[in-house]
Structure formats: structure tokens, C-alpha cells
Amino acid sequence: MAKTRIKAKLRKGVVTVKTLSKHPMLSYVEAKRAKKEANFITYFVAEVNGKVVFEVSTSQFLSKDPYLKFAFTGANKDDIIKITWKDLKGATVVSTGKIR
């Protein structure tokens, strides 16, 4: 199953997170051309200690294996960040990483 690579660093009270999600991100046009079913990530959320720190609804216009970068405050070193995303077909992928 697909997985998301996570790098989260705490510096001066701000956590910067970089994620790389493995997904083909087939838009409707590409899927029609390839005679396949469209499938792309539609929802992405990041949580730390049960609190949502980043949430976004996405569309077919992200590239294959999308890279997302975001920052937030209010976390500590060694806290666990949980990344969850869902795609058009209903698959849900959950990945975790430690804030360094």
C-alpha cells in the first residue's frame, strides 16, 4: 500500500513539515487517455496530539507523488505527527513521523 514520507523539524517554536505521498494522481483527462479510472488524492490532514494542524481538500491538479510543505506552532520535539489522506476511490492511507 502507498505510504507518505514525513520530515518534521522543530526550530524556534515552529514545526516545518515536508511530506511526499506515493500516488499516481490520475486526472480525468489522463485517465480517459490511458483508458483507466480517474483517481487522485481528495483530502489531506495532519494531526499532532489529536489536534488538526493542517487540513486541505485537493483536486486532480496536483502532480504525481505530491509533495506538500507546511508549518505550524504548538508542538514539541519527539511529538508524533499523523498524516492521513483519502483518494477518489475511497482508499485511506495513514502515516506517522516524529518531530525532530
Image (cartoon, rainbow, N blue to C red):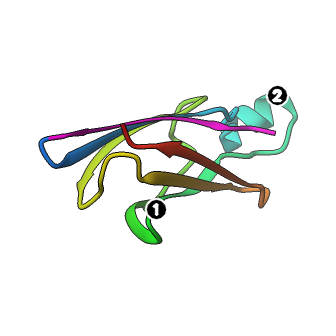
Q: Earlier in the sequence, mark 1 or mark 2?
A: 2
Query: Would you identify the image quadrant in which residue 74 lies?
Result: bottom left
Q: CA distance from mark 1 to mark 2?
A: 36 Å
Magenta span has 14? no
Task: Give the residue drawn at x 79%, y 56%.
Answer: 89
Q: Is residue 61 above or below residue 89?
A: above
Q: What is the crowding at mark 1: few (fewer than 14 residues within 10 Å), some, or many (at least 20)?
A: some
Residue nearer the viewer, 97 or 31:
97
Residue 33 coordinates in the image, percent (x, y): 78, 29
Looking at the rendered structure, the kind of residue marked 1 is Glu
**Horizontal relation, residue 14 to residue 70: left or right:** left
Residue 100 image point, x, y percent: 36, 37
Residue 29, horizontal then vertical, whole percent: 68, 37
Q: Residue 47, labelled with which disc?
A: 1
Give the SS element for disc 1: strand
Q: Nearer the viewer, residue 65 or 72?
A: 72
Q: Quadrant of the N terminus?
A: top right
Question: What secondary structure characterizes most of the magenta part?
Answer: strand
Residues in magenta, as a range:
1-11
Residue 3 belongs to magenta span:
yes
Q: Secondary structure at mark 2?
A: helix
Residue behind mark 2: 34
Relative horizontal placement of residue 96, taking residue 94 as reference (left or right): left
> What residue is shown at x 12% (from left), y 42% (from top)?
12
Point out the residue furthest to the front here: 78
Location of residue 25 by image quarter: top right
